[in-house]
Image (tube, helix red, strand yellow):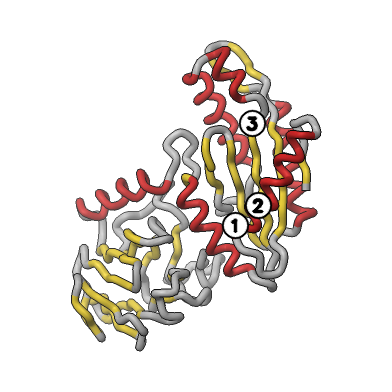
Amino acid sequence: MPQSKDQNSNTDRATVLESTRGERDEHVPRVIVVSGMMLGLQVELGETAVTIGRASECELTLPHPSVSRQHCRIWREGGRYLVEDLGSTNRTYLNGKVVERAELSDGDQISIGSNAIKFFLGASVEARYHHELIDLAIYDSLTGFFNRRHFRGLLDEEAEKAGRSKPLALMMMDLDHFKRINDRHGHLVGDQVLAGIARVIRGHVAAGAPIGRLGGEEFAVALRATTLQAAAAIAETLRAAVEERAIDVREQCLPVTLSIGVAESRGEASAAELLRLADAQLYRAKQEGRNRVCS
């Protein structure tokens, strides 16, 4: 996703927030994507103008053909916030009306191609309402990871940005013999195990790396600017950490192991191809005895 222009600077700047969870200052003016592939993505608004478009160099990137490379921009002028169309093909709409340039009010909706974003000045009731709806729409409630649909959208964007210039690795993992846990101990214990494993995964993955629950006991992690060799090393560290840490549930410790498949994007491989490659390695890990990493 688009990142801050200077990660270490204390100056006022546009800040992209990868999710609506965690600590957030809801009193800071911001725009939130409320419809489209990047649902939930938000950008804080400061002194720096925020350009919105399909191009990866935009402060808010919406990777969809209906969006122009540089579609529109939002900036502060005195005590006001303004939006301006940048000559986009499909125009910019403010609350359903085409605009060239207009002042924004709290709660305004800006339509950009097939996407919609909302502008909020602060912690209004509507802003909190949208935060809650977005949380429900993009997160898995048990693990806190992105759900399958949203993770796939993020992976599409990461694959498009990586292209030939940067490596992109994908880890796909599956809890070994998880059905036995559910059958012997019940689904409540199974959920506790999944939540415990999710904490281990989060603790061994770099902050900001997209993590998804693809379904059941299957998870995936996208590793930006990471080679296959480096990703396999991370996966092995994670596999060992899960093996060494039994999950405490109902005053008992349940041993759990993890099989992991790792793949790296090749040239301009699509997200679907990357998923296929990682899934094939995961299948191989299971076929070769589980509790291992294949790449």
Q: Are marks 3 and 2 in contact (CB under 8 Å)?
A: no
Residue 224: quarter of image: bottom right
Q: Disc number at residue 175?
A: 3
The kind of residue tagged 2 is Arg
Q: Residues within 10 Å of mark 1 (few under 14, many from 20)?
A: few
Residue 169 position in % (x across, y down)? 68, 56
- State the SS at label 2: helix
Q: As displayed, is residue 196 above or below residue 231?
A: above
Q: Are marks 1 and 3 in contact (CB under 8 Å)?
A: no
Q: Can residue 233 be seen from the camera position used here?
A: yes
Judged left or right of residue 101, residue 163 is right
The kind of residue tagged 1 is Ala
Q: Residue at x 47, y 69 (%)?
A: 63
CA gap, disc 2 and disc 1: 6 Å
Q: Residue at x 62, y 35 (%)?
A: 200
Whichever of callouts 3 and 2 sits on the residue coming sooner in the sequence is 3
Which residue is at the front of the view, 282 or 253? Answer: 282
Q: Disc number at residue 276?
A: 2
Q: Which residue is mark 1?
A: 272
Q: Disc number at residue 237?
A: none
Q: Residue at x 65, y 44 (%)?
A: 172
